[in-house]
Amino acid sequence: MPFKVLIANRGEIALRAIRACKELNISTVSVYSEGDKDLKHLKFSDETVCIGPASPLESYLNTPAILSAAELTQVDGIYPGYGFLAEDSNFAEMCEKSGFKFIGPNSETIKNMGDKITAKTLAEESGIQIVPGYKEDIPEDPEEFKKIVKNIGYPIMIKATAGGGGRGMRVVESEDDLISSAEITMQEAKNAFGNEKIYLEKFIPNPRHIEIQVVGDGKGHAIHLGTRDCSMQRRHQKIIEEAPAKNIDQDALDQTYEASIKLCKKLKYEGAGTIEFLYENAEFYFIEMNTRIQVEHPVTEMITGFDIVKAQLRIALGMEITLQQESINFNGHAMECRINAEDPETFQPSPGKITKMHIPGGFGIRYDSHIYGGYTVPPYYDSLLAKIITQANSRNSAIKRMISALDEFFIDGIKTNHSLHQRILHDKTFVDNKHTINYLENEFLKDGN
């Protein structure tokens, strides 16, 4: 059956989707903004449609413009990638109502798992451990509010119910800061997400960030593709990811795998998803479920040989997952470095023209990117330029291979965080796999590395 897909995204994930579509003989339509007319993937798409000015609000976040392009080009499905509208339940619902297959979970699942409180309830019902906290409406009486927090125990984390991407979060160390911190977080949440509702969690001081990749066919069958460790972070944004996560208690992991699959089956989850956890002292604590492909999906693909993007498309075509869990083989270790257009010390964005560059290659090295020599990086979007992925028999070998790849890689004309990655890969704490989510900001960068 002929199938035609509109790719509602940009950059490397759009190029990644086109490659998968070509393998499945799926025709592609790529939408783009006026600021993105020189993107690489537009040259490889069967059709292209400009959907508005460079501003994301007027283009990639403009639902009517995207749906109009879909109608104009008579596509069957819409592939959202990550970011932008990928986890927007309203967009998914509009696609469904307009007769287009949203390539991902249905709008109800996105809505339920996008609401942090609902997601925690569903996770807990499936046997997944959650962080102790308070999910009800925060009482207006300050004394009652203080009493609730005292029962949880300081420090606590105040979080926006509709938050994401590291925003809408605040740690409170003592009762003195509780009321003001809650008010500030509510205001930030209202401004950023249009929803001021907050909830409380016990603050886990020094955890690792571990996630489980899942895939469901929407008919009640689901599998997992193992773990990823994404603990190397700055301001809750991942910088280096790897698979599988090392030094994890096997009993705790097996129980969490089982509960995660139970959740997917309960949801009749469709497509690719990631269940994220804080991990400390052999305990997994549920954070959230991302109902989309992740930036770091290549490390999982490298150790399993499972093409996650192709699976998303095949499931959208109505194909069941016939692969059984025991058929998934895990081979070696993979690592990904995110190369961003930013100053490696101040982290200020660095848009501009790439005058010259060289990409790494060789055995066990993968390079996912949309950039090229002469390309001008626009100032309007996420700073991600490229992902360098290495795979080897062991973690140490994957690190050595990454060092070699980074030594070979260069970009001239703009600043990137390339040198930061080189410093991290030579850091003893990282090499010994003893870093947590706080290490980069609180120790590595403060020590002047």
Image (cartoon, helix red, strand yellow):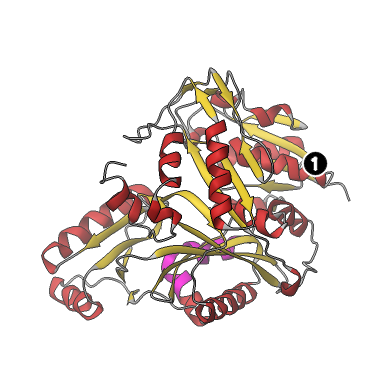
Instruction: Determine the residue located farthest toward the left in the rendered image.
Output: 176
Is residue 428 in view?
Answer: yes
Choose top left, top right, bottom left or bottom right for residue 138: bottom left
Question: Residue 86 at what x, y percent from top left?
Answer: 57, 50
Question: Residue 413 at what x, y percent from top left?
Answer: 47, 19
- Quadrant the C terminus occupies: top left
Magenta stretch: residue 114 in it?
Answer: yes
Look at the picture and state if 369 lies above or below 87. above
Question: Residue visible at 62% across and 75% down?
Answer: 261
Residue to which mark 1 is pinned: 22
**Horizontally, is 155 left or right of 77 in the view?**
left
Q: Secondary structure at mark 1?
A: helix
Q: Residues within 10 Å of mark 1 (few under 14, many from 20)?
A: some
Q: Nearer the viewer, residue 167 or 140?
A: 167
Q: Nearer the viewer, residue 388 or 405?
A: 405
Choose top left, top right, bottom left or bottom right for residue 107: bottom right
Question: Residue visible at 13% across and 68% down?
Answer: 175
**Horizontally, is 144 left or right of 433 in the view?**
left
Choose top left, top right, bottom left or bottom right for residue 28: top right
| Residue bounds of the magenta highlight | 105-120
Magenta stretch: residue 288 in it?
Answer: no
Please name the amino acid that badge 1 sits on.
Lys
Question: Residue 15 at what x, y percent from top left?
Answer: 67, 37
**Horizontally, is 378 left or right of 156 in the view?**
right
Question: Residue 327 at what x, y percent from top left?
Answer: 76, 70
Is residue 26 in view?
Answer: no
